[in-house]
Image (cartoon, rainbow, N blue to C red):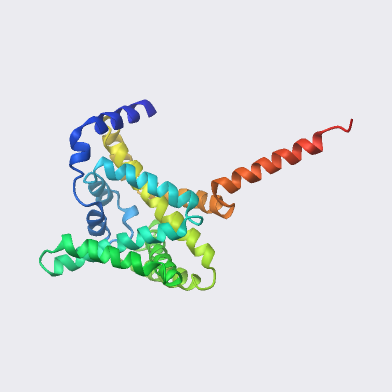
Amino acid sequence: MSTTLLTTLAQSASDDSFFSDTGENPLALLQSALAGRLDLLNHPGRLVDTLHQINGVWAVIFLILGAICVFNGLRWHKGVIIILAGMLGALAGLWVGDKMNGGHQVAAPALALLFMVVALPGLRFAVALFGGLAGAFIGANGWTASGGDESIHYVGALVGLVVVGMLAFMAFKFVIVLFTTVVGATMMSVGALTVMLRVDAWNEPLVESLHNNPLIVPLLVGVSSLVGIVVQEGGGMKGLNDKANKASSGAEKKGAKPA
């Protein structure tokens, strides 16, 4: 299984079109998929259609950035916030470009740069904003996944937005951990599924499995987020490694017999 995946990635990487043509803007694709459907993770048909349009280059980028967010989001939260602010600015630029009947090439980078410059001085408000958006995403998908009426999933989104947004001013560190793990887990899942869908032998079985079990993706994102929260609360991968080394050293000292 892993050999097939590595072979596919190697063949894709060796193909000039893999790098020369990175396909449609993934931010625009995700914006379109999430428009009016924040509980996207519970709709495998719509999700798979979007993943099929994402180029393999972006899938690998999503995997790398997602892993950074999940396991070290708190430690590198300023950089993560700047990147997310840039992505949000680019999305805003795409929306403005649509209203202006074009102009995406100017509006998207201009607003991305503006959002990135403003993000650090307004760090606490940026955390509240991204935390609230992550809360809305969690609430919407949690609402549908728990059996709620998907036509009013925005109720769960609104609750998540308000609760997590307010928590940013009372539990700053926790909200950073929460939104970095949720964003990271989602990016990792999108990247991994996109790569897997590029493998011919896995495409059809994976699509069928996702359609038959709509909770697979929400569960995958949820478990990854919980793992990330545990890791980050433990001080990140380095912190967990240090604690493991200390515990091992302590056990060895206790077990040592006096000369």
Q: Is residue 104 left or right of residue 206?
A: left
- Where in the figure is residue 20, as x and y percent of width and height? 18, 40
Tell me what residue is drawn at x 23 percent, y 54 percent.
Answer: 29
Above or below residue 127? Residue 147 is above
- In the rendered picture of this protein, how many numbered marks are placed on residues? 0
State which quadrant residue 8 falls in: top left
**Residue at 28% over, 63% down:** 112
Q: Is residue 44 visible?
A: yes
Q: Quadrant of the N terminus?
A: top left
The picture quadrant where one finds residue 258 is top right
Residue 132 location, x and y as percent?
A: 41, 68
Seen at 70% across and 38% down, the residue is 248
* Picture quarter with the C terminus: top right
Q: In screen coordinates, is 137 left or right of 71? A: left
Q: Nearer the viewer, residue 19 or 220?
A: 19
Q: Of all residues shown, which one is farthest toward the right?
A: 259
Viewer-side residue, 118 vs 95: 118
Residue at image position (25%, 66%) is 111
In this orientation, does residue 223 appear?
Answer: no
- Nearer to me, 26 or 226: 26
Give the left or right position of residue 74, taking residue 202 as reference. right
Residue 88 percent coordinates (x, y):
31, 63
x and y percentages locating residue 140 in the rendered image: 37, 63
